[in-house]
Image (tube, helix red, strand yellow):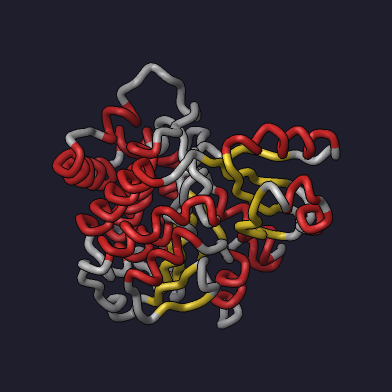
Amino acid sequence: MHSEIVFMFSGQGSQYNKMGLELFGKQPVFRQSMERLDRIVHQLTGKSVIEELYQNSRGKGASFENIVYSHPAIFMVQYALAETLEAVGITPRYTLGVSLGEYVALAVAKVLTPEQVLELIVTQVRLLEDTCDNGAMIAVLDHVQLYHANAELNTRSELIAVNFDKHFTIACRSGHTGEIQQFLREQGVASLKLPVNYAFHSAFIDELEKPYRTYMQKIDYKTPAPGVTLVSAMTGGNVQTVDESFLWDVVRKPMNFRTALESMTAGGPRRLLDLSPSGTLENFSKYILGKPLAHKVGSVITPMASELKKLNEIVNDTLEV
């Protein structure tokens, strides 16, 4: 078994309709975990994420944008997959979260309980809807110099992540989305508006700070479980102490996945497992680390099928002596 296993978790933008459906239908641990988490959400909101995510007529891979459901769903699917892997003996030495994925990393590292995290997420959604205007997040497939060199971008949006050499993400107000995408098309640059209707990691959500931090001050934060190192894509490195300031920065500050990944892998070989719904972090990691380490990265859930097959392959490879 690989001695240094990393569980990686993604945030908003990685979700889609029926993510994890094959595991939910055929993997008992995953299903039981999802159902337990769904009961928690139902107690908090009166709504069922499972019903909204799986029991609809829309095809797998269709948009899943309503933050009331997508925020808890992103946590639920990734946490359930972590429990599925842990049930067969695959436990993380590191948990690395990106944006909302940091909440999953906190729960897996036992800094917070799943109940605490889901209450955090539900509260964040309610306060977002009460305090912030809609916004957008756009992934751009080009060098970040494009952003810095063009007022059409840097005066209408904020740079919130540089994922690798030709991939960065910006956040903007909803009213600027069309103008920005039109400019990018005119430049021959590919872009993708992420399926999220708030401009996380930017000044466009600053109205959320006061009420959310006030709520988070009441939470009892633990230190990471023995043997688990918490790694943050916000700080770009290891985290020893979590409090409301850290959690607010996770929502508000830019993401720094590349630095976090490079700092962690510099210490020796790691087995990187992307537990996100889309395999995005697997792709990012392969670009960042290059060929020598690319085979050490794997994922389970994708918009395509074969989730059980990929899970079995990960289990067999990771537990291989």
Spot occupied by residue 283 in the image (x, y as percentages of width and height): 62, 52
At 23% across and 47% down in the image, what residue appears? 33
Q: Quadrant of residue 143?
A: bottom right
In the picture, which quadrant includes the C terminus? bottom left
Residue at the image point whose x is 57% and y is 75% from the top: 265
Q: Is residue 201 left or right of residue 241?
A: right
Residue 59 to residue 129: above or below: above
Residue situated furthest left in the rendering: 43
- Horizontal side, residue 115 vs residue 22: left or right: left
Q: Nearer the viewer, residue 152 or 96?
A: 152
Q: Note whether 192 is above or below 199 in the view shown.
A: above
Does 41 sit left or right of 63 as displayed?
left
The residue lying furthest to the top in this view is 57
Foreground pick, 17 / 129: 129
Q: How many marks?
A: 0
Decide if residue 182 is in sight here. Answer: yes
Is residue 191 depicted above or below 83 in this figure? above
Residue at 28 percent of width and 78 percent of height: 223
Question: Is residue 320 in view from this perspective?
Answer: no
The location of residue 30, given as percent across then percent down, is 28, 45
Q: Quadrant of residue 287?
A: bottom right
For the N terminus, the image quarter is bottom left
At horizontal 47% and vertical 46% (from top left) the residue drawn is 12
In this view, 99 is above or below 20? below
Residue 74 image offset from top left, x and y in percent:
39, 46
